[in-house]
């Protein structure tokens, strides 16, 4: 029988030599490479150090990389909790091999099962107290019996075997941590399994009072004798995984056979020798800011004082933006729950109403401190958010909410703490259904394999691998804070810096996928998206309603998203997967329409989209629209009709500068109340532009050809872009209307559409805008034919932009003769421009001749016989147009324009 040993007094071991340690990143996880004795010495030293924060110790294997590595669900979650430092050691043959490749030397495996016995030896030798948390009660009994024989002097101060429900519940976990703290272990062995043990230690470890917490999941079974270690020769050949799989196939088959390959790919792809550990990692600089304890989340006792919402002009901690559509019954309860949140922070509330009637606005009138904005139509969710954000003014963060939400007290404060402590750009809360259950609101980045998995299984098999499901069904994901790809757009807290960096929400999506797009752009800009489970909101999930058209729009917008962010081939595969999912559900309401819409792009225009009754945000925008017109009686009404909502605002000067007109252009324009009509005696577009510039003092200004139709939404986007800066010039997108044109003309414009350079300049759309500072660079318009080309050449690429607006309509010539007339005028303008300032005088001049560059782009865009024929037609017209332009430039021509499209 073993005799009791006399325990020497505690002394801190000598510091570990720096020569035997090195930081690397393995699969995106910061790992400290160490020799066995060095690791043992460092852990033992921290167990006796009462002045340092608690140390969490874990061993990284492929399973660890799957959970905590690059692209893993819990990536960054351990480091985000600064109350516990982490020492991550290397385990698993693939990680050891990768570490050797990175550093050029071999490092030992430091598995928890190898470290635990020597650590218990050290604890016994130095009189350190030990506690065991996790495993079954039966396993703990077996360990106690063994320790009574083998380690009679080991001071085990507590055994805790909580059910999973306990460690998954915040209040129960706090109570458990308090009981452990009463026992006062120096070392706490935690065996919940990955990732649960690391997450629990990160969140509650500092409350246990333990100085070292060992996240050694399997050691309880090893110590109890439930699981045998692999023979040494199997371990030395890197085959211990096969041994464990043989012993426990049902439990470990997925880990090794399904998840293992994915983790191995991450290991090889995302490893680096120069990875710098973050705050919260042992051996790094320990940050001064402490994360708020879970128990410190504000509650709402009855005597908490609430405050009025602030006006738009005030700088608030949080500006709440709510988009409504027939939500008169929802806004009252939402506002009541928001008022309780003013006890924790200053807030202002903006409601952007898309409703077709005034009932929602009438209900909002009962809340005098709520800023109600009528969008003037139904701009969709993205458009409504943009309108609300512009009306909200300055704030530390912006909270976007669905109107059918109810906030639990302290939700906003919890989201703000997560944003502060993790550096998140976007924070999303936990959403609860009416029965109190957690709604699975977290999502993964859309991909072809996930679309196929969702098509095949839908909501069945919720435990399938993440690469086969866009929706995150795992209950564990909703219990701890962590980074996510995106979440449903019902509630998002966006930092001010993220909002200004990412910019407007993309209104092409109208409804659905707009939050996917915004979160992706936020992540790409370096602003991670975090989930905060302590922020809880009740969601009725009925705000948008449902219909076959909305079901179709949901699928179509997924296709739009893939087309925006994926290469063409992958986007096509994604579209096929979405189509397969709809075909598989043809018997369900709405999916027949969705399948048809996904397959046939022509149906997209009939789906719900932005509409407006009047110009949105009346009174919030100002500027000028200048239309030079020479004998435009057949088209001027068409242009002014498109601007009627703008004219009615009275905040935008619409000026028609009639130059040398001999038809009814002036009288037609004069019929539009609110339009300024100027008479310029000389037939000169340049004279008209300069005269109109002198007739207004409003900025920014958009210059519009009389035969172009511009929507108020497009004008709004141009004005906002120029007002916000740093752009000095911008134009809206455009589309060619070739209806009525001959086949050869349509062929020419098909080829023209395929040339990227034709869509990247300010010229060619018949519309462009200038800010005050942009116009200052221009001065007066010079006497050149191509005013838009001249303006384009004044600015560097980062000073101008083609905006993704609702496109203006450019009607093309209908005949080859009219097309040649337009081309001759354009090429003549190019020649005048080169003669006036030289081919390389402008800051935007290309190093490659424009004709050569166009030819290269045209050839690159040729994909088959039809596009090749179109390219040939384009080149023939280009040659003929240049020849005609040369004759005209030398004095043989006159002003050419297309009359065929003006009928």
Image: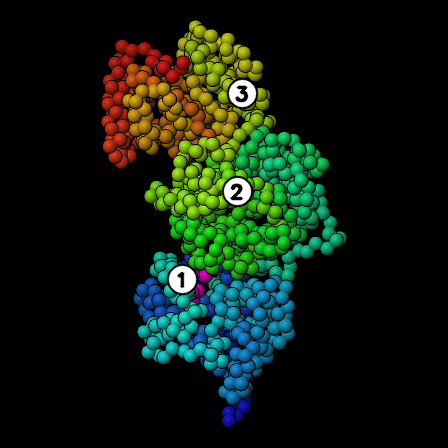
Residue 392 is situated, as x and y percent measured from the top left of the image, at 60, 37
Q: Distance from label 3 to label 2 (Cα)?
A: 32 Å
Residue displayed at 48% across by 28% down: 714
Quarter of the image with the C terminus is: top left
Q: Are marks 1 and 2 in contact (CB under 8 Å)?
A: no
Q: Which mark is residue 644?
A: 3
Viewed as shown, does residue 641 lie left or right of 813?
right
Q: Mark 2 falls on what kind of element?
A: helix
Residue 45 falls inside the magenta stretch: no
Residue tagged 2: 499
Q: Mark 3 falls on what kind of element?
A: helix
Q: Earlier in the sequence, mark 1 or mark 2?
A: 1
Viewed as shown, does residue 404 lie left or right of 861?
right
Nearer-the-camera pick, 498 or 432: 432
* Residue 776 visible, this angle: no
Does the magenta stretch mainly form a helix, a strand or a loop?
helix
Q: Quadrant of residue 180?
A: bottom right
Residue 338 is situated, as x and y percent measured from the top left of the image, at 66, 46
Residue 773 is situated, as x and y percent measured from the top left of the image, at 47, 28
Q: Which residues are magenta?
A: 59-69
Residue 451 is situated, as x and y percent measured from the top left of the image, at 42, 49
- Judge depth for marks 3 and 1 and give the one in front: 1
Q: Earlier in the sequence, mark 3 or mark 2?
A: 2
């Amino acid at each position: 029988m073993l005799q009791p040993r006399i325990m020497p007094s505690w002394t801190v071991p000598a510091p570990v030599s720096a020569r035997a340690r090195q930081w690397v990143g393995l699969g995106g996880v910061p790992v400290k490479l160490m020799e066995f004795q060095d690791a043992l010495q460092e852990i033992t030293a921290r167990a006796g150090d009462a002045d340092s924060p608690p140390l969490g110790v874990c061993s990284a294997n492929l399973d660890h990389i799957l959970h905590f590595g690059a692209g893993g669900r819990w990536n960054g979650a351990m480091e985000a909790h600064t109350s516990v430092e982490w020492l991550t050691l290397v385990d698993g043959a693939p990680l050891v091999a990768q570490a050797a490749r990175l550093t050029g030397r071999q490092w030992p495996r430091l598995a928890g099962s190898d470290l635990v016995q020597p650590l218990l030896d050290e604890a016994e030798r130095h009189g350190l107290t030990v506690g065991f948390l996790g495993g079954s009660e039966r396993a703990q009994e077996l360990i106690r019996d063994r320790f009574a024989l083998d380690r009679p002097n080991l001071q085990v101060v507590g055994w805790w075997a909580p059910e999973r429900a306990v460690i998954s519940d915040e209040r129960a976990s706090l109570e458990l941590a308090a009981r452990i703290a009463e026992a006062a272990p120096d070392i706490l062995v935690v065996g919940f399994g990955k990732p649960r043990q690391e997450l629990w230690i990160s969140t509650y470890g500092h409350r246990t009072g333990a100085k070292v917490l060992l996240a050694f999941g399997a050691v309880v079974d090893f110590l109890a004798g439930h699981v045998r270690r692999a023979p040494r020769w199997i371990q030395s050949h890197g085959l211990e995984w096969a041994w464990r799989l043989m012993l426990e196939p049902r439990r470990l088959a997925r880990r090794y056979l399904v998840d293992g390959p994915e983790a191995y790919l991450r290991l090889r792809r995302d490893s680096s020798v120069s990875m710098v550990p973050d705050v919260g990692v042992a051996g790094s600089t320990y940050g001064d800011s402490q994360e708020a304890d879970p128990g410190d989340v504000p509650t709402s006792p009855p005597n908490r004082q609430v405050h009025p919402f602030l006006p738009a002009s005030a700088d608030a901690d949080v500006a709440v933006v709510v988009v409504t559509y027939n939500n008169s019954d929802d806004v009252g309860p939402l506002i009541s729950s928001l008022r309780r949140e003013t006890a924790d922070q200053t807030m202002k509330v903006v409601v952007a109403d898309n409703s077709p009637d005034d009932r929602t606005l009438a209900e909002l009138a009962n809340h005098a401190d709520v800023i109600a904005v009528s969008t003037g139509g139904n701009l969709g969710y993205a458009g409504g958010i943009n309108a609300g954000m512009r009306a909200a003014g300055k704030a530390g963060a912006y909270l976007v909410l669905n109107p059918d939400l109810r906030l639990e007290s302290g939700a906003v404060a919890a989201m703000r703490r997560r944003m502060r402590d993790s550096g998140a750009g976007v924070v999303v809360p936990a959403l609860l259904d009416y029965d109190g259950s957690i709604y699975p609101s977290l999502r993964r980045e859309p991909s072809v394999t996930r679309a196929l998995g969702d098509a095949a299984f839908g909501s069945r098999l919720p435990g399938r691998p993440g690469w086969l499901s866009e929706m995150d069904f795992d209950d564990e994901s909703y219990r701890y804070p962590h980074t996510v790809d995106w979440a449903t757009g019902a509630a998002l807290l966006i930092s001010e810096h993220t909002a200004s960096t990412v910019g407007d929400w993309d209104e092409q999506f109208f409804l659905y996928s707009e939050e996917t797009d915004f979160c992706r752009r936020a992540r790409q800009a370096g602003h991670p998206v975090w989930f905060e489970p302590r922020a809880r909101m009740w969601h009725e999930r009925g705000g948008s309603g449902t219909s076959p058209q909305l079901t179709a729009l949901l699928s179509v917008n997924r296709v739009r998203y893939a087309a925006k962010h994926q290469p063409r081939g992958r986007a096509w595969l994604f579209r096929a997967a979405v189509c397969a999912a709809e075909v598989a559900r043809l018997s369900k309401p709405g999916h027949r329409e969705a399948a048809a819409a996904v397959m046939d792009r022509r149906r997209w225009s009939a789906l719900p989209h932005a509409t407006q009754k009047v110009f949105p945000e009346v009174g919030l925008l100002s500027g000028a629209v200048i239309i030079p017109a020479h004998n435009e009686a057949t088209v001027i009404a068409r242009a002014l009709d498109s601007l009627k909502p703008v004219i009615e605002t009275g905040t935008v000067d619409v000026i028609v500068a009639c130059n040398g007109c001999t038809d009814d252009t002036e009288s037609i324009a004069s019929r539009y109340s609110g339009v300024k009509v100027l008479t310029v005696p000389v037939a000169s577009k340049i004279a008209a532009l300069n005269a109109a510039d002198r007739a207004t003092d409003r900025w920014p200004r958009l210059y519009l050809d009389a035969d172009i139709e511009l929507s108020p939404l497009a004008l709004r986007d141009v004005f906002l872009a120029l007002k916000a800066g740093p752009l000095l010039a911008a134009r809206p997108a455009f589309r060619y209307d070739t209806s009525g044109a001959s086949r050869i003309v349509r062929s020419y414009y098909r080829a023209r559409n395929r040339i990227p350079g034709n869509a990247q300049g300010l010229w060619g759309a018949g519309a462009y805008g200038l800010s005050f500072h942009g116009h200052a660079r221009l001065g007066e318009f010079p006497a050149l034919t191509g005013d838009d080309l001249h303006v384009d050449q004044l600015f560097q690429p980062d000073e101008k932009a083609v905006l993704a607006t609702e496109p203006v309509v450019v009607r093309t010539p209908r005949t080859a003769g009219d097309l040649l007339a337009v081309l001759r005028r354009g090429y003549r303008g190019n020649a005048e421009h080169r003669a006036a300032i030289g081919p390389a005088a402008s800051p935007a001049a290309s190093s490659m001749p424009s004709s050569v560059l166009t030819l290269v782009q045209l050839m690159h865009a040729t994909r088959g016989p039809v596009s090749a024929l179109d390219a040939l037609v384009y080149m023939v017209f280009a040659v003929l147009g240049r020849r005609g332009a040369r004759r005209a430039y030398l004095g043989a021509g006159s002003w050419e324009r297309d009359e065929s499209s003006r009928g």
